Image (spheres, grey):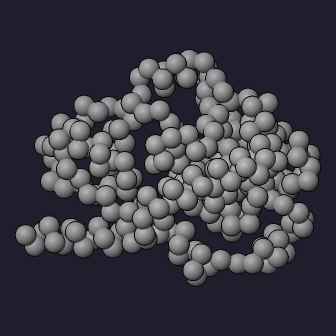
Amino acid sequence: YISPKIWAWKQYRIKDFRRYVDRMFCILPFETEFFRKLNYSVDYVGNPSVDSVAYYKEHQAIPKDAFIKEEGLADKPILALLSGSRKQEIKDNLPTMLKVASAYPDYQPVIAGAPGIDPAYYQEYIGSYPAKIVFGKTYPLLQHSAAALVTSGTATLETALFRVPQVVCYYVVAGQLASFIFKHFFHTKYISLVNLIGGREIVQELFGARFSESQIQDELGRILQDPAYRKRMLNGYDEIIHTLGMPGASKRTARLIVESLGS
């Protein structure tokens, strides 16, 4: 259940799949076609992020005024900063995100604190920036945000499921070299789940040679100030939400496993 991402690199591992895996249940819709081309049949069962976001919206969603009061936020539009879950990611991405956010004083930057990271670690980078941190409340933060700066990973998909326009920005060492390696040695055009699922560029991916304060600021400006551009991104989100299908990934997987064992 949940395939290793050999569609990105190391496609030769399909030999191990054929040798050891009798049945594969995948959570990304494009994986069925990828594996079909390798003559290996898999089942797409839905995506767990769809399940968790749907559950939150139905059972845990809170009004914006309650969220603002609980977290001591200002009564103005929220810019969510999702700078990663590891210390190195936070170190590499958060300072630039904060600089970009400061260019839009009509919006308040709110950082989604990662589990296991001490608040003091964030304070090293926040300094005098007027940014708040919330822990354990990424979904309420996304629910009430006008836009988001997001490092790559599941967070990009969750941001799309909440229909929050985003800039995907991810710092890597030796940006030019990293872009070259990605272009010539990886088997996919994109790094974000949003674009991978959509099969096209729905959100801008500013990583490698494209990661810079000016480019991130320009893209955020388009999202905040160009209604038509913002609408196109939201329409793209709606397409991938439709592609992902209904909640229930793990239940469908369990049912298929039982049927498979029974046969």
| Residue drawn 58% across the image and 82% down it | 59
Pinpoint residue 39: horizontal percent, then vertical percent. 17, 41
Pinpoint residue 137: horizontal percent, then vertical percent. 67, 66
Question: Compared with residue 105, is residue 262 higher up or lower down, i.e. above or below?
Answer: below
The one nearer the camera, 38 or 179, is 38
The one nearer the camera, 49 or 238, is 238
Pinpoint residue 247: horizontal percent, then vertical percent. 43, 71
Give left or right: position of 131 versus 200. right
Q: Tell me the quarter of the image containing the C terminus.
A: bottom left
Number of marks in picture: 0
| Residue drawn 35% across the image and 38% down it | 7
- Quick check: can you spot residue 45? yes
Question: Compared with residue 47, is residue 186 higher up or lower down, i.e. above or below?
Answer: above
Q: Tell me the quarter of the image containing the N terminus.
A: bottom left
Give left or right: position of 247 versus 263. right
The one nearer the camera, 135 or 176, is 176
The one nearer the camera, 40 or 222, is 222
| Residue drawn 50% across the image and 36% down it | 190
Give left or right: position of 222 versus 237. right
* Quarter where residue 74 is shown: bottom right
